Each structure stands twice: as structure tokens, then as C-alpha cells.
Amino acid sequence: MAAGGARVVSGLSGRAAGRPLTLRGVLLRNRVVAAPMERNYCDLAGRATQRYVDYLGARAAGGAALVFTESSYVSQVSKARPHQMGMHDDAVVPALRAVADAVHAGGALLGVELNHAGRVVPSTVSQQVPVAPSAVACREIGGELPHALSEAEVQDVVHDFAEAARRAVRGGADVISVHGAHGYLIGQFLSPRSNLRTDRYGQPTAFLTDVVRAVRGAVGEKVPVFLRLSAFEGLPGGLDVEASLALVDQIPLDAVDVLDLSAGTYGAGHWITPSGEVAEGYLADIAARYRRRSGLPVSVAGRVVSPDVAERLLDCGAVDLVASARALHADPAWARHVVEGTQPRPCIACNQGCADVIFTGRPLWCAANPGTGREGRARPVVVRDRPPTVAVVGGGPAGLQAAHVLASGGARVVLHERSAVLGGQHALASRLRAKPQFGRLLTWFTAELARLHVEVRLASEPDPGEVLHAVDGVVLALGAEDYLPQVPGVDHPRVVGIRRWLQERSAEVEHVAVWGADRAAVYVADDLASRGVEVTLIARADGLATDAGARERLHAVERLHASAAVRLHLGAVLTEVLPATLRLSTADGVSEVAAAGPVLVSQGAIPAEGWQPWSTSDGTPVERAVGPDLATFDAALRYGQSAAERLLLTLSGATTRATTPAISERALQAAP
């Protein structure tokens, strides 16, 4: 029996992921943990909302053994974000009880992670001066100069952790986790970058030890306690793998039941939520070392997104539990897929609707699944004697999502795509260096449409009159095309929209000019430079991919700035395209730059033409999957979802369309 009282119960599944685990008499039905992740679904007082209840309830019903809430602040001064969950006051307990009831109804255990954000707390959120082990600001994020805690104040924080743990258990939590990772207060005491103390709390694990002992004392001997640690910080002068591992010898392991391994810190957040360029399960070998060194069960996070990888990590004995947040964000039934060895709707590690949204205060969505965050909303289903036949015109992201929703809702679906492959612009993006996981979503859609018996017709440009006569409804998902601003020379044959060029390019080129600095421009420029193409990028903007979040764009932007093959002309207005040069206007005047190859225009997108012939329908309902934001695939998925739901409501004879117009992140600005 391992330290902390863990034992493995004889397996109830042939797969390692399906084997139960008992911790201090508390049974986990399998080895899959829904990891803590902030979602901005709480109210300003730190209380869970109904949206939060529905969200976690769906992950429990989807098969996870243990479902964590999120990093929950233990006191007002430790609150880092306006809509973060709180465990700081008894007033949060009733709402937590509602979350616990929903999670338990789904057959899972509820975990609550306790945290103090320390020096990275914005005073604009907490209304108090941030605190830290030492008066050292987090320069990487422009942090404020914190107040250095006195020994008495440190003890007050320890007390706050203990009281928060008691509240969590009163609210129905089965498991408590202490957050010692990612550069928050406990991590700040652990790190030589932020702990310059000379008293007893200068010893890196002294504060952690006090917190863990206090939490154990508060919850008693029957509640499992997890401890989350970063395997490394990822910053110069910080804790590396070996230094982090050595700290295990100084942790009170008798008070801990599971070591939960992650990585990264503030300033190196790309290790907390790694992009798709990072290998899946990249912490597995390090986690195995923690397991051997501590004798404790180990849970690992960090790019564990596919069932095969999760099963391999468990089956080889590297870890005892796999923890994932983004994978379950994309598919609430991810745990069941892991246990059964089937394929979930994939997380594609884009960070567009999750990690890069947390700091904005907006409720999280999922770029790969427009249903995320809407778990409590009714889904329209056709109730008719004969299943209606529906045509979906367009096989890009919007069309694929529409076809999936319609078929799931009881319609017979015929999908027409004019090209020889499905995926539209998403398929083009999946070829780029920065988006290696995008193709997984297309693979999933292809399998799902086959499972739902959707008839897919490729290289098909249907006649509107014939289709409208033969079907009960139509969804037009014609996609978007490049917008080309009218500047002199834009009609030159070498000027082409960036999307069109990606679709039609056949010959290799030596030099390319990219006009624009949005995410499409940056990712294409990055990909071309990586292939040895000389790239000249011209943009009015002063920054690169500012329409994308910091973690999404990080690697591509860094590579462009570092590449000798890339010339950046930012803050420049393109005024004319000449046969072998481009004329630019900047604050310093007018100049010309050499650019003899193709000029790729990335200045946004407009709705594709071709919908007008469908508007003459005589009674057959036609819905367009279109909206104001046409430049991203996640918007396309939402528009496809919305159009399909509107059509299902019409076909079922519903008199209201209140279920869901297209839900965008902008429509969710208010507190959930």
C-alpha cells in the first residue's frame, strides 16, 4: 500500500483507464480526472452559477472519475480574476453544494483546488496590494510590486487555506487539491526567482508544508488530498526538472495522497497549456520519476488529449491517473472514450476559446465544440412520422457542424461539397506548421458523419432548383472568401487572397510577400519561412497576430521575429502593387520594397458568393450559416450549429426559435 493509503481495486475494465482506484477509502471509478480549469462561469462573488453546474455535471455524466472545479481563491487578497471561483467565504457553500449534487448525480467525485495567487493578483481585481514571499514583482507579466509577507501574515494565509478546505468539504467536495504549481503563492515560495527570504520561510518547502499540514488537519483523515506541482518553471533562474524533483524529499508526503504533475509558471504559460506543437504526454517520463521517488500515486496533465496516449501512460505504469482539462472542455464524454477506447471530439490545442480567454473575463467557449458552455440548453430534435431530408451545401467547418447537428437531430442529411475533400479552410490550416492538430477535427467529423449515415457528395455543385424541389430544408454553408482592398495594382495577376492561394498553389516559390498581420497571415508566413521561402510581411498594425491570444500565437510570432528569412514592415500602409516591388507609406515617408513573387492578401474575409439562387425557394426553408466573424473556424462551427438548430426547429413545427441563435464569445460578455 502506497503512502497516503492508496490501493488499486481489481480492474473492472480490460483497459488500464477503466481500473478503479481507492484513496483513503474513497473510490474513483476509473483513472480519468477532469483537471481544474478556470472558466469565468462564476459570479463576481465567487459563487458557481447554473452554467457552472451544468458544465461540470456533463463532465461527470461523461464518465470522469473525479471532476475538479478550478483554482479557487482562499481569501480576497488571493483573488486573481473577477469571475474566479471562491472558497473564501461561507456564502459560496450553497452554490458549491449544487455543483456537488450535479457531479455526484453523474457518478463522479467532486474535487476542489485551493489557491492563493500571491504576487500575480491584480489589485484591480482584489482591491488589495498583492502579497508574496519577497517584494519581487513578476516582470514577465508586468506585475505590481507585492508586499512581502511577515511570518505572522504567512500564518494567516495558512489559516485561510485550512478554512477554505473546511468550506469545500461542507459544500460536498470529496477531494481537496492544494495548488503548488504555475507560479502562484506556494510556487513563489518554492522558486529561487521569487523567494529571497532569510527567515524559516526562506526554506522553499516550509510554507507548502504548513499549508498541507493545515489542510489535512482541517479535512480529517478520510478526505484525499492532492498536491499540484510544476515539473519545471521554464524560465531562466527558475526551478528546472532536477531542482523541482528534489523538493519532493522535503514535502510531508504522509499528508498527501496524490502528486498531480503539471509544468510552467507565469511568463512560461505555454507549458501550462501547451500548443499542438508540443508532443502529447510530454511529462510522462518526469511523472514516472516522481512516482518512484515519492511512493505516491501520480496524476499527470500536459497535452494528454487522445485516448490512446492516456491509455499508454497508464498501462506502462508511468502514472496512476491522467488529468485533462482542455480535452474534456472539447468533449464532456472524453473520459468514457478513454475508458472504452473510442474517439472523442478532439481538443486541437488551439487555446482560442480557453487558455487565451481566461484573462479577458469572458466566459470560456471551445473553438472545436460550439456546444461547450451550453450544456444546460435544450437541443432541438425533429419529431415527425418521416425523417425529413435536408441538404447541406458546403463541406467546410460550418457545413460539417450543421450536418452533424441535423443528423443527430433526426434528419436524413445529404452534404454537398464542391471540392474533392472536406474541411474547407480548416483543411488548409491543418497543413500549417503552427496547427498540426487541426486535422484531427476533420478526421473526427468524417467518422461521425459516416456513423450518422450522412450522404457525402464530393465534387458536387448542386442545382438549387432541383435540390429545393427534392428536400425538406437546406443549410447553406458556403464559407468565406478573401477581401481584397482596392489599392492600385491589386488586380495584378500575382496578387491573390491568402485563402485562395493556399487552396490553389501548385509550384514552389522562392519569395512571397504577405500583406497583413492577422493570424492567417502570421501562420502562413511562419509556415513558408520554415520551408525556406523568403517572406516579406507588410502590415499597418504594429504587432503580429493581435487578433489571436498570447498563447495561441506565441511560437509562430517568436519564429518570425527570429527568422533571417523574414522581413517585417510593421506600421506600413501598402499604397500600390508594382510589377516587382511594393510601394509603402510609413511615418518616415514613402518607400519601395522588392517583392517579385506572389503577393498574398490577408485583410479579412467576406461571405462567399452563390447564395442568391437559393433565396428563391417557394416554401422550402433555407438557413444560411453566416455571421459577422468569418475569419476563424470556431465562428464557422457556431454559425453551422445555429443554422442547423434553426432549421430543426422549423422542421419540427416549433413556434419559437429561442433555443440558440449563433452563440459567439461576444454574446457572452455578461456574467454567466
Image (tube, helix red, strand yellow):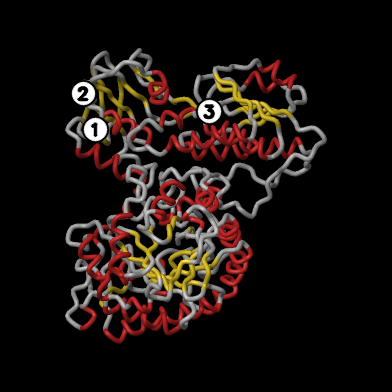
Residue that carries the numbered disc 2 in the rendered image: 593
Residue flagged by tag 1: what amino acid is it? His
Quadrant housing the C terminus? bottom right
* Circles 2 and 1: CB atoms closer than 8 Å: yes
The first of marks 2 and 1 along the sequence is 1
Q: What residue do we see at 37% from left, 70% from top? A: 227
Residue at 58% x, 69% y: name it: 100
Residue at coordinates 48% horizontally, 74% vertically from top-left? 87
> Can residue 127 be seen here?
no
**Viewer-proximal residue among 84 and 530:** 530
Count of numbered badges drawn on the protein: 3
Q: Distance from label 1 to label 3 (Cα)?
A: 30 Å
Q: Dot 3, crowdedness within 10 Å: few (<14), some or many (≥20)? A: many
> As shown in the figure, which amino acid type bears the numbered disc 3?
Gly
Q: Are marks 1 and 3 in contact (CB under 8 Å)?
A: no
- Secondary structure state at the residue bearing disc 3: loop
The label nearer to you, 1 versus 3, is 3
Q: Which mark is residue 479?
A: 3
Separation of marks 2 and 3 at Cα, in angstroms:
34 Å
Q: Which mark is residue 70?
A: none
Q: Label 2: state its secondary structure.
A: strand
User: For this rendering, which residue is in front, 87 or 120?
Assistant: 87
> Is residue 424 rendered to the left or right of residue 158?
right
Q: Which comes before the other along the chain, label 1 or label 3?
A: 3
Task: Report which residue position mark 1 lands on.
Answer: 569
Place of residue 41 in the rendered image (x, y in percent of width and height, measured from the top left):
53, 60
